[in-house]
């Protein structure tokens, strides 16, 4: 299929009251797991890689593989740079054919975030790609007390108007990595942002958020949900399972086990985000698997 833009996929999701899963990948097995699950469920997804992961998974290798996976898949797929930090990497991703750029200017003060995000948004639009910006500060992995700054709903409205982004990542008590304690999402903040902002909202830090919370976020305007840590955990769990029960091992068996675990994790999330089956059924499936 031709590569789709993130904006098109989230607009489609909006018309169906669901969210698109955006799954981070770092190698071929992860890519195969995501594409296999999306194809089986006939559900569009976003394949993404974060700039901070490029040390382990270089963009010149991962980028072409992600593009090729999207082109050869039987479902619509967008390919996005996640948490882009520099113009150089954004330019590289766009030249490889990425259809979306997430620029993370949330570490800067507001006016600089606006200025940098606007510049990246113009670059992306020139290349025919869509853009996601971030306002507020999403928590970091393992923090006991989240050093998170909730997105200001009034500023969010202004930020979207000034930058022209197609989607907005919000900070509402969500965090990257593993949550040190059960996440308590601030639905009052999400509701206020949703009322002020006309574009779709993005939830980062999806790993560890309960299915019922995902569904509630979707009811409050979230149209893209990022899953990264759970994908990487699934990959390494696949390897752990494979090596646990055998003494004679080979790469091909390891490959299959890793792909299978990532596939299972992605499939579970897609079913939640699609609103297709009841939460009771999802929990029942999990229990049966356990
Ligand atoms: Zn993120």
Image (cartoon, rainbow, N blue to C red):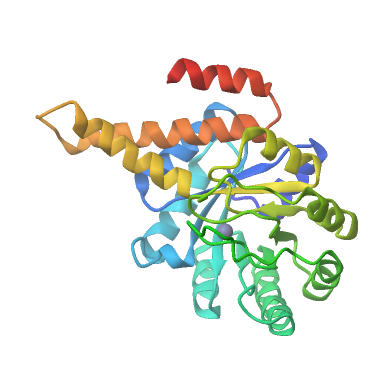
- Residue at 26% x, 37% y is 240
Q: Residue at x 63, y 64 (%)?
A: 148
Q: Does residue 98 appear in the picture of this structure?
A: no
Vertical arrangement, residue 66 with respect to residue 21, above or below? below
Above or below 185: residue 109: below
**At 73% from the left edge and 59% from the top edge, which residue is drawn?**
167
Q: Residue at x 52, y 54 (%)?
A: 48
* The C terminus sits in image quarter: top left
Specify whether residue 137 is in view: yes
Residue nearest the viewer, comparing 269 with 88? 269
| Near-viewer residue (51 or 178) | 178
In the picture, the quarter occupied by the N terminus is top right
Ligand 1 is located in which of the four quadrants? bottom right
Q: Position of residue 274 (x, y in %)?
A: 68, 32
Q: Residue furthest right?
A: 195
Please, is residue 79 above or below residue 17 in the view?
Answer: below
Query: Which residue occupies the foreground of this view, 26 or 192?
Result: 192
Residue 213, how many percent across, how many down? Answer: 69, 39
- Give coordinates of residue 262: x percent, y percent: 42, 37
**Residue ranking furthest to the left:** 248
């Amino acid at each position: 299929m031709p590569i789709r833009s993130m904006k098109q996929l989230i607009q489609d999701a909006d018309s169906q009251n669901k969210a698109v899963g955006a799954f981070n990948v770092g190698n071929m097995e992860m890519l195969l797991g995501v594409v296999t699950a999306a194809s089986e469920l006939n559900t569009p997804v976003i394949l993404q890689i974060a700039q901070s992961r490029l040390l382990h998974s270089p963009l010149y290798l991962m980028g072409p593989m992600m593009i090729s996976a999207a082109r050869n898949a039987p479902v619509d797929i967008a390919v996005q740079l996640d948490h882009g930090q520099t113009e150089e990497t954004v330019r590289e991703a766009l030249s490889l054919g990425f259809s979306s750029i997430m620029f993370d200017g949330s570490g800067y003060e507001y006016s600089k975030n606006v200025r940098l995000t606007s510049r990246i948004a113009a670059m992306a639009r020139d290349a025919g790609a869509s853009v996601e910006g971030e306002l507020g500060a999403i928590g970091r992995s393992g923090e006991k007390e989240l050093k998170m700054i909730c997105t200001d709903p009034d500023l969010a409205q202004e930020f979207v108007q000034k930058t022209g982004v197609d989607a907005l990542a919000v900070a509402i008590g969500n965090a990257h990595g593993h949550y040190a304690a059960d996440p308590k999402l601030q639905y009052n903040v999400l509701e206020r942002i949703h009322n002020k902002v006309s574009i779709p909202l993005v939830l980062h830090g999806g790993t560890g958020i309960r299915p019922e919370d995902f569904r509630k976020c979707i009811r409050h305007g979230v149209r893209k949900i990022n899953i990264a840590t759970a994908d990487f955990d699934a990959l390494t769990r696949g390897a752990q399972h494979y090596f646990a029960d055998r003494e004679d091992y080979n790469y091909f068996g390891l490959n299959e086990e890793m792909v299978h675990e990532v596939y299972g994790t992605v499939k579970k999330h897609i079913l939640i985000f699609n609103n297709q089956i009841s939460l009771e059924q999802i929990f029942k499936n999990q229990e049966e698997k356990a």
